[in-house]
Amino acid sequence: MKNIATIMRKEYARFFGDKRMVAMTLLPAVLIYVIYSFMGVAMQSMFAPDEGHAPQVYAVNMPDSIARLIRASGMDILPIKLGEAEGIKEKVARGEADLCMVFPSDFDAAVSAYDAQTSVGPAPNIEMYYNSTDPNSNSAYWLVFSLLDSYESSLANKFDVNREVEDADRASPEDVTASIISSLLPLLLLVFLFSGCMGLAPESIAGEKERGTLATLLVTPLGRSELAAGKILSLATLAFLSGLVTALATVLSMPKLLGGTEDMIVANIYVPSDFVMLAFVILSTVLLLVTLISILSAFAKTVKEANMTVTPMMIVVMLVGVTGMFGGAQESPAYYLIPLYNSVQSMSGIFSLDYSPLNIALASLSNLAYACVGGYILTKMFNSEKVMFSR
């Protein structure tokens, strides 16, 4: 353990002593928070109507029955003649008017006389003209459309659905938030963890190999297994911290990105045991990723070659991460023996508040077992002169 601790201190000193490397590790987290927050603000300003804007509806032959509904929703009605409709349509196209509606002159009478079973010809038609690129016009259109749809249903009302039932949707706000998080964070978190490992492991293995310092370590009395363990544990710790900071930045920026409030994320959705489970999953995943990248980097002669060798693995990681978007977590324990896939399923289950502690433990232990096998392989590679000193 003393020799392993020595290697770990050496790696920590190399990392924290390089301000540029520390800055580059923290930069993705800062960029993610800034970009996601900016995207959320931009999307809200793009699709949300102007604050305090009262939509104005220009209407031809609007009957009083519908006018009362529209005025009750807070919109102004400006009656116009049929000959003025074309000019208003042009104003809507230019974003100078919100909505133009044209009713048949005898709309109420035509609706009363129409019977879908016996009437000949189409039902009375309402023409609505709006501008989907204008948030004010688009919002007014969908509000009026929903009012008209409700009004149409009330004309032939034969039964009610959920009348005076205010809590028909049994999903709590916490459940809705957990569902959104569980569909996004497993992919993002796995990619962040891999990026952190990829930014550290090639430099530690292939970089020292390229500079010749790894050869110096190999000729010391230090055991090759101790060298492999020290490298893996130190890199896993640094990658874990990198992924944790990036994940925290993502969580903090999600309220703005999703258009909600901060209560949407920081509410008491998760309990301490959930975070403990997540920590085990993340730590075991990082150990596995660091081990795999270290093995690939040991084959490379330079850092550039190592990065090229590891890059295809990024595609595999992203494909595995996407599986977290397909419904809830798997229930069968067999799925939690598959490397990386078990991590995604575990994170998906934790974030959706629907997981089995046994499956989480199985995934973490299997990842640790795979990391131990990888550590053994890396030790053998350190013992191979053909691998370590090839030119």
Image (spheres, helix red, strand yellow):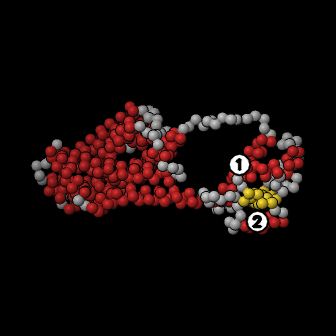
The vertical placement of 323 against 59, above or below, is: above
Query: Circle 1 is placed at which residue position?
Result: 146
Which quarter of the figure has residue 305?
Answer: bottom left
Q: CA distance from mark 2 to mark 1?
A: 22 Å
- Using the image, tell me which numbered label, if any, was put on residue 288: none
Query: Circle 2 is placed at which residue position?
Result: 88
Q: Position of residue 240 (x, y in %)?
A: 32, 48
| Residue at left offset 78%, top offset 52% | 67
Q: Number of numbered discs present?
A: 2
Of residue 339 and residue 234, the one placed in the foreground of this image is: 234
| Residue at left offset 53%, top offset 52% | 259
Indicate the amino acid at tag 2: Ile
Q: What is the quadrant of the N terminus in the image?
A: top left
Q: Mark yes or no: residue 81 visible.
A: yes
Q: Position of residue 329 (x, y in %)?
A: 46, 38
Q: What is the quadrant of the C terminus in the image?
A: bottom left
| Residue at left offset 32%, top offset 60% | 23
Indicate the amino acid at tag 1: Ser
Query: Circle 1 — which element?
Result: helix
Query: Circle 2 — which element?
Result: helix
Of residue 209 and residue 174, the one placed in the foreground of this image is: 174
Q: Position of residue 50 (x, y in %)?
A: 62, 60
Drawn side of residue 143 relative to residue 60, left or right: left
Drawn side of residue 152 relative to residue 131, left or right: right
Q: Mark yes or no: residue 306 visible.
A: no
